[in-house]
Amino acid sequence: AYNFNSEGILFPEVGKNLILRPLSADDYDKGFLEVLQELTDVGNVTRDQFLSRYHYMKACDGSYYIIVIEDIIKNLIVGSATLVIEQKFIHECSVRGRIEDVVVSQNYQKKNLGKVLISTLCAISEKLNCYKITLECKDNLLPFYENFGFKKELNNSNYLQKRF
Ligand code: 16G
């Protein structure tokens, strides 16, 4: 569902009237935040707040890869996923990828769009030479992610969080 060229990754059509592409500044008006709201609480985010966060992320060259799927007939974002690249000293100054905020809108499920999003981010991670990529998910999504080779780490490894 994706190709590489010397300039990076091409985002061809991934389904009828659907395209895969990087997040753009216009996506505030195409329902990007409404799609994220299907994943968790987004709250009130003004256009200015969205744009300032978007431009901040864009300026962190090579750190945020946010991809979206757009229904080009409806001008609507129907899915999104983010790859965050973390710079390391370990593993010979390697990089680690985190897959975050993966969501496909309810009406567009069962079309393999999740697969397109995750396989694209996995391909980008590999191209960027990540030594590992990680994600957190609910129990019901474990089989989905296991299809891409993600595994629960069993040896003395715990996922901890502290919320504010
Ligand atoms: C899920 C997401 C995570 C997101 C979190 C939001 C994936 C693979 N995982 O764990 O990226 O940030 O939900 O939930 O998409 P929260 O609002 O409870 O932190």
Image (tube, rainbow, N blue to C red):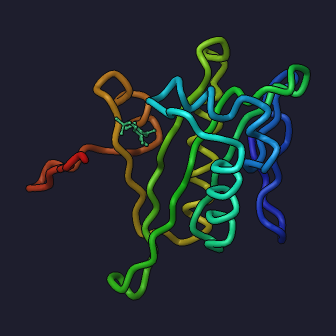
Q: State the residue at coordinates (40%, 63%).
A: 132
Residue 102: percent from left, percent from top:
52, 37
Whole-percent x and y of residue 56? 63, 65
Residue at x 56% of width, y 32% of height: 36
Tally the marks: 0
Residue at the spot x=85%, y=42% of the render? Answer: 12
Q: Which of 43 and 10 is in front in this view?
A: 43
Question: Which residue reaches farthest right?
Answer: 73
Instruction: Tell me residue 65's x, y (percent).
Output: 63, 57
Residue sitting farthest toward the left:
156
Image: 106 above or below 164: above
Q: Quadrant of ligand 1?
A: top left
User: Front-most of 108 and 149?
Assistant: 108
In the image, 142: left or right of 7? left
Q: Quadrant of the N terminus?
A: top right
Q: Residue at x 82, y 28 (%)?
A: 18
Residue 113 image position (x, y, % from top left): 65, 28
Question: Which quadrant would residue 108 be assigned to in this image?
Answer: top right
Q: Is 17 above or below relative to 96?
A: above
Quarter of the rendering containing residue 31 = top right
Q: In the shown orientation, is residue 141 left or right of residue 64?
A: left
